[in-house]
Amino acid sequence: MSTETEGAGESRLPSEPQHTTGRDLAGLAIALGLFALAILIWWDASSYPVRRSYAQFGPEIFPYLVAAGLVVFGVLTVRLAILSEFPERSEMNWPPVGWIVGAVVAEITLLSIGAGFILASGALFGLSARGMGRRPVWFTILVGVCISAFLYILFRHGLGLSLRAGPLERLIDSPFRR
């Protein structure tokens, strides 16, 4: 039987992974990043004050759980990298990455100069949305500011959390003061 007359159901799909020999160095780098993040979270959690009531553990356990989960994912990533079982990665699309990195930088910058939670989070939302394909930027930032204002009211006045205050936050807080 020639290869031309084989059954149609027996053909290989082009998207099936081709296993190669050797290690996936990018996968190992990702695993190393996961381990480093787990260590950082574990170290930070070790400085939390212990607040226990009737339970045997308090809220400080959650960072430890996150760190443990990252270690598990790191081990699984090492396994995939050593066995070269990662799916083929597509080419990096740099403009969206630039928008999202810019969004994080804008958030940090706005918080550090005292613009407040609402403007900083609105910029983060809007620029990230632009990185994911939404346009126009001014509209996505406006939507982000509106959502952030709602969340500020919810967190600050509903839950009593303290968030970075800027001019918009002071304006929103003024009717709540007596």
Image (tube, rainbow, N blue to C red):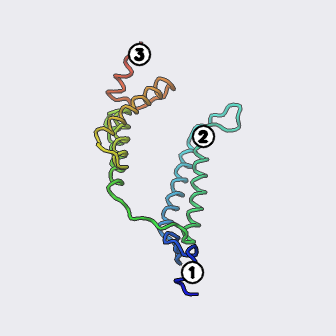
Q: Residue farthest to the bottom?
A: 1
Alpha-carbon neighbours of circle 2 within 10 Å: few (<14), some, or many (≥20)? some
Which residue lies under the disc numbered 2? Answer: 60
Q: How many marks?
A: 3
- Spatial CA distance of label 1 from label 2 is 62 Å
Q: Earlier in the sequence, mark 1 or mark 3?
A: 1
**Viewer-nearest of discs 1 and 2:** 1
**Circle 1 SS class:** loop
Q: Nearer the viewer, residue 126 or 6?
A: 6
Which residue lies under the disc numbered 3? Answer: 177
**Circle 2 SS class:** loop
Which residue lies under the disc numbered 1? Answer: 6
Alpha-carbon neighbours of circle 3 within 10 Å: few (<14), some, or many (≥20)? few
**Viewer-nearest of discs 2 and 3:** 3
Q: Which mark is residue 14?
A: none
Q: Is residue 160 above or below residue 96?
A: above
Residue sitting at 32 percent across and 42 percent down? 109
Residue sitting at 35 percent across and 35 percent down? 143
Residue 171: give x, y in percent of width and height: 34, 22
Q: Nearer the viewer, residue 107 or 145?
A: 145
Q: Is residue 35 above or below residue 178?
A: below
Residue sitting at 32 percent across and 38 percent down? 141
Give, as a three-letter code, the residue at label 1: Glu
Identify the image quadrant of the N terminus.
Answer: bottom right
Which image quarter: residue 150?
A: top left
Q: Residue farthest to the front?
A: 5
- Spatial CA distance of label 1 from label 3 is 80 Å
Give, as a three-letter code, the residue at label 3: Arg
Give, as a three-letter code, the residue at label 2: Glu
